[in-house]
Image (spheres, rainbow, N blue to C red):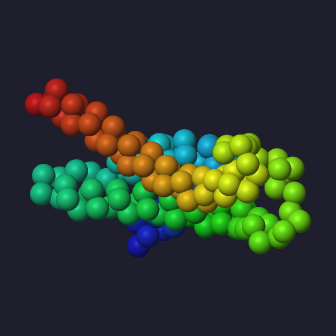
Amino acid sequence: MNSVICSVRGLVLFALLDAACAGLGMGVPLLCIGLGLLVGWRAARRLEPAGSAMPQMLRRLLVTGALTSAFTFLMMLVIWGPCLAKLWENDAELANFGMPMLLFEPRPSFIAWLALMVLISPFLQFLMTLFGSCVTLAWRSDETHALA
Protein backbone atom coordinates (compact mmCIF):
# COMPACT_ATOMS: atom_id res chain seq x y z
CA MET A 1 0.00 0.00 0.00
CA ASN A 2 2.87 2.37 0.79
CA SER A 3 4.34 2.04 -2.73
CA VAL A 4 0.93 2.91 -4.22
CA ILE A 5 0.76 6.05 -2.08
CA CYS A 6 4.33 6.97 -3.04
CA SER A 7 3.61 6.43 -6.72
CA VAL A 8 0.41 8.51 -6.60
CA ARG A 9 2.28 11.22 -4.69
CA GLY A 10 5.06 11.08 -7.28
CA LEU A 11 2.59 11.37 -10.17
CA VAL A 12 0.88 14.36 -8.58
CA LEU A 13 4.26 15.99 -7.90
CA PHE A 14 5.33 15.38 -11.50
CA ALA A 15 2.05 16.78 -12.83
CA LEU A 16 2.49 19.95 -10.79
CA LEU A 17 6.14 20.35 -11.81
CA ASP A 18 5.37 19.67 -15.47
CA ALA A 19 2.52 22.19 -15.44
CA ALA A 20 4.80 24.73 -13.77
CA CYS A 21 7.51 24.12 -16.37
CA ALA A 22 5.00 24.56 -19.20
CA GLY A 23 3.73 27.73 -17.57
CA LEU A 24 7.23 29.14 -17.12
CA GLY A 25 7.90 28.39 -20.77
CA MET A 26 4.63 30.11 -21.73
CA GLY A 27 3.33 26.99 -23.47
CA VAL A 28 6.66 26.01 -25.02
CA PRO A 29 7.68 22.74 -23.29
CA LEU A 30 11.44 23.30 -23.30
CA LEU A 31 11.62 23.14 -19.50
CA CYS A 32 9.36 20.07 -19.56
CA ILE A 33 11.92 18.29 -21.73
CA GLY A 34 14.62 19.15 -19.18
CA LEU A 35 12.35 17.87 -16.42
CA GLY A 36 12.38 14.52 -18.21
CA LEU A 37 16.09 14.20 -17.42
CA LEU A 38 15.39 14.61 -13.70
CA VAL A 39 12.47 12.20 -13.82
CA GLY A 40 14.63 9.58 -15.55
CA TRP A 41 17.37 10.04 -12.97
CA ARG A 42 14.91 9.70 -10.09
CA ALA A 43 13.16 6.67 -11.59
CA ALA A 44 16.44 4.83 -12.12
CA ARG A 45 17.59 5.67 -8.57
CA ARG A 46 14.34 4.36 -7.07
CA LEU A 47 14.39 1.03 -8.87
CA GLU A 48 16.92 -1.40 -7.50
CA PRO A 49 18.52 -3.47 -10.27
CA ALA A 50 18.68 -7.12 -9.30
CA GLY A 51 20.51 -9.48 -11.67
CA SER A 52 17.48 -11.27 -13.08
CA ALA A 53 15.08 -8.34 -12.67
CA MET A 54 16.90 -6.09 -15.16
CA PRO A 55 14.36 -6.61 -18.01
CA GLN A 56 11.51 -5.82 -15.61
CA MET A 57 13.30 -2.68 -14.41
CA LEU A 58 13.89 -1.53 -17.99
CA ARG A 59 10.20 -2.06 -18.76
CA ARG A 60 9.29 0.06 -15.74
CA LEU A 61 11.63 2.80 -16.94
CA LEU A 62 9.96 2.71 -20.36
CA VAL A 63 6.56 3.02 -18.69
CA THR A 64 7.86 5.96 -16.65
CA GLY A 65 9.04 7.68 -19.83
CA ALA A 66 5.73 6.96 -21.54
CA LEU A 67 3.76 8.41 -18.63
CA THR A 68 5.80 11.62 -18.61
CA SER A 69 5.39 11.95 -22.35
CA ALA A 70 1.66 11.19 -22.26
CA PHE A 71 0.99 13.82 -19.60
CA THR A 72 2.97 16.45 -21.50
CA PHE A 73 1.20 15.48 -24.74
CA LEU A 74 -2.22 15.95 -23.12
CA MET A 75 -1.15 19.25 -21.60
CA MET A 76 0.17 20.53 -24.96
CA LEU A 77 -3.04 19.36 -26.62
CA VAL A 78 -5.04 21.44 -24.14
CA ILE A 79 -2.78 24.47 -24.63
CA TRP A 80 -2.29 24.36 -28.41
CA GLY A 81 -5.35 22.35 -29.50
CA PRO A 82 -7.71 25.34 -29.77
CA CYS A 83 -5.28 26.92 -32.25
CA LEU A 84 -5.96 24.10 -34.72
CA ALA A 85 -9.24 25.77 -35.68
CA LYS A 86 -7.23 28.60 -37.27
CA LEU A 87 -6.07 26.18 -39.99
CA TRP A 88 -9.55 26.12 -41.52
CA GLU A 89 -10.22 29.83 -41.28
CA ASN A 90 -9.65 31.56 -44.62
CA ASP A 91 -9.16 34.98 -43.08
CA ALA A 92 -6.85 33.88 -40.24
CA GLU A 93 -3.85 36.14 -39.71
CA LEU A 94 -1.32 33.33 -39.17
CA ALA A 95 1.61 35.62 -39.89
CA ASN A 96 0.65 37.71 -36.84
CA PHE A 97 0.11 34.72 -34.54
CA GLY A 98 3.44 35.25 -32.76
CA MET A 99 5.25 32.06 -33.72
CA PRO A 100 8.51 31.94 -35.66
CA MET A 101 8.36 31.62 -39.43
CA LEU A 102 10.14 28.28 -39.59
CA LEU A 103 9.27 27.62 -43.23
CA PHE A 104 9.05 31.26 -44.43
CA GLU A 105 5.32 30.99 -45.18
CA PRO A 106 2.60 31.55 -42.58
CA ARG A 107 0.47 28.40 -43.04
CA PRO A 108 3.29 25.81 -43.28
CA SER A 109 5.11 27.52 -40.41
CA PHE A 110 1.96 27.40 -38.29
CA ILE A 111 1.52 23.67 -39.00
CA ALA A 112 5.18 23.00 -38.23
CA TRP A 113 4.95 24.98 -34.98
CA LEU A 114 1.90 23.03 -33.81
CA ALA A 115 3.54 19.72 -34.75
CA LEU A 116 6.65 20.73 -32.84
CA MET A 117 4.70 21.74 -29.74
CA VAL A 118 2.12 18.94 -29.64
CA LEU A 119 3.91 15.92 -31.14
CA ILE A 120 7.67 16.32 -31.16
CA SER A 121 8.19 17.94 -27.75
CA PRO A 122 6.52 15.12 -25.75
CA PHE A 123 8.57 12.60 -27.74
CA LEU A 124 11.73 14.53 -26.87
CA GLN A 125 10.72 14.43 -23.22
CA PHE A 126 10.29 10.65 -23.52
CA LEU A 127 13.79 10.38 -24.97
CA MET A 128 15.23 12.65 -22.29
CA THR A 129 13.63 10.54 -19.56
CA LEU A 130 15.17 7.40 -21.04
CA PHE A 131 18.52 9.17 -21.41
CA GLY A 132 18.48 10.21 -17.74
CA SER A 133 17.70 6.62 -16.75
CA CYS A 134 20.46 5.17 -18.93
CA VAL A 135 23.08 7.60 -17.64
CA THR A 136 22.07 6.90 -14.03
CA LEU A 137 22.21 3.14 -14.59
CA ALA A 138 25.61 3.47 -16.25
CA TRP A 139 26.96 5.45 -13.29
CA ARG A 140 25.46 2.98 -10.83
CA SER A 141 27.03 0.04 -12.65
CA ASP A 142 30.41 1.81 -12.49
CA GLU A 143 29.93 2.29 -8.74
CA THR A 144 29.09 -1.39 -8.21
CA HIS A 145 32.09 -2.53 -10.25
CA ALA A 146 34.37 -0.17 -8.32
CA LEU A 147 33.13 -1.56 -4.99
CA ALA A 148 33.56 -5.20 -6.03
For the point 34% across and 56% down, the residue is: 61
Which of 79 and 38 lies nearest the eye of the viewer?
79
Which of 76 and 84 lies nearest the eye of the viewer?
84
Task: Please say whether residue 16 is visible from this viewpoint.
Answer: no
Q: Position of residue 16 (x, y in %)?
A: 65, 57
Task: Please say whether residue 44 is visible from this viewpoint.
Answer: yes
Which of 28 and 47 lies nearest the eye of the viewer?
28
For the point 56% across and 59% down, the residue is: 119
Q: Quadrant of residue 52?
A: bottom left
Q: Quadrant of residue 15?
A: bottom right
Question: Is residue 35 toward the left or the right of residue 108 in the image?
Answer: left
Q: Quadrant of the C terminus?
A: top left
Q: Position of residue 81 (x, y in %)?
A: 71, 67
Question: Is residue 74 toward the left or the right of residue 2 in the image?
Answer: right
Q: Is residue 105 above or below residue 82?
A: above
Question: Is residue 39 toward the left or the right of residue 49 in the image?
Answer: right
